[in-house]
Amino acid sequence: MNHKNYQEFKKRRNTLTEKIGDGVAIIFNTDEVIRNRDSHYPYRSDSYFHYFSGFPESRSVLFVLGGKSPKTILFCRNKNLEMEIWNGFIYGPKEAKEVFLFDESYDINLLDEIALKEISGREKIYYRIGQDTLNDKKINDWIKVLRDKARAGIQAPQAIEDISQIADDMRLIKSDFEIDIMKRSAKIATLAHNRAMKSVRPNMYEYELEAEILHEFMSHGVRAPAYQSIVAAGKNACTLHYVDNNSKIQDGDLILTDAGCELEGYASDVSRTFPANGKFSKIQKDFYQLVLEAQSAALSKVSSNHNWNEPHEAALSVLIDGFKDFGLCQGSHQEIYETGAYKEFYMHRTGHWLGLDVHDAGDYKTIAQEWKQLKPGMTLTVEPGCYIRPSANIPKEFWNIGIRIEDDVLVTHNGHEVLTKDSPKTIESIETLMAK
Ligand code: GLY
Ligand code: MN
Ligand code: MN
């Protein structure tokens, strides 16, 4: 997560300061996680910590204090030449404060001591409750220490409020700075899917195609996929989160790739479905066209005139009609909708918020339990699908067809912009690209 524009992060902290009154917001970064013995999982900051700090190191904590004299404090590791020789550069509090524009910064080992001073006398702590039991305990311990000093006139905070409500509302509307990164992340994801379409041949293994996708990601400066890539040939496409990617691709298979990259912290999330041999069969075309029409119906409802649920309902309506026409579901449209019979073939929702997390922060309903209105600056996926597992009641020629078409979409003032439009999705344009 390499940024030059740390003013953007400072601006976010200022906004947070305004929203927490006299309280103190405490945001812990994640720690390194051991994979096995001396080997760690690739490090990735906590999304909230990154959003409000831009600071890339583990073992760090951010305090944002509101009220009459607001300030921000970063706790981080001290510089340590020996550690740096082994593991690389450490900012240290002094340089971190200057580069990342905090008001104060301290050695992480002083956290308990300084935290007690800073939270004493504050009414409320804003914090992400229940995310990490050790951090939960730390906050509770601080409160207990302060309570025990009540006779000395020290006042412990009276309330802890989950910071998610405030932070998620902020994260839900992307700034120009974020949109610029998300556009680049989306573009790289489309190049990767296009590369997969051009590279695939029957008898390849799914992991070989995954390698093409990862190669494209990394050649554009991406250090990691945003989630484990799905490369699912034939029946594997009917497993929604198939990540084994170790089957041999057969002539005649449809291949579902669901892969996105993480660029400067921001996820793209794209799915394409294409024929292993470059030509859709008649039946594959029929089902593909149905999902494409469902996606198009959903996209037509992505604008600030619609709420979160309308794209899903639009896609679902097209799919239900299709399932009826193909004889997969019986009864009236209304009955299929109400009984949920369609869920045998379409069991997920049509999208999710997208941002620092692939399933990004933010509620989908208001406090009054109504679907949120879409607003300019929101980013979401639109990803209908159709998955037909073998079953005695279903014609054999439909078996094992798994299709998902997923794009990343920005809500704009005039409607929406599909950020992943550079990867083909009509039957004709896919076949044309694959023939190259
Ligand atoms: N790739 C995860 C999803 O589409 O939600
Ligand atoms: Mn998705
Ligand atoms: Mn996806």
Image (cartoon, helix red, strand yellow):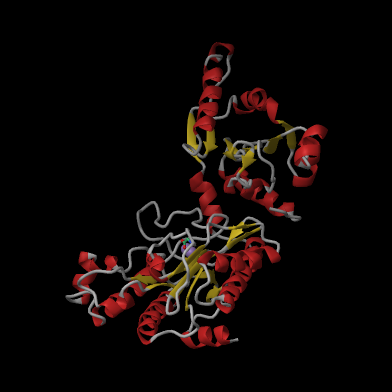
Residue toward you, 41 or 46? 41
Q: Residue at x 35, y 54 (%)?
A: 369
Q: Where is residue 125? Give x, y as percent.
A: 54, 33
| Left or right side of 201 for 14 | right
Vertical placement of 100 versus 178: above or below?
above
Q: Where is residue 49? Give x, y as percent.
A: 61, 44
Q: Residue at x 75, y 46 (%)?
A: 100
Q: Residue at x 25, y 82 (%)?
A: 325
Vertical placement of 300 versus 22: above or below?
below
Which image quadrant is residue 61 in? Answer: top right
Which image quadrant is residue 175 in? Answer: bottom right
Q: Where is residue 429? Give x, y as percent.
A: 53, 86
Vertical placement of 7 versus 160: above or below?
below
Q: Is residue 264 visible?
A: yes
Q: Name the quarter where the C terminus is drawn.
A: bottom right
Q: Residue furthest front?
A: 203
| Left or right side of 72 for 237 | left
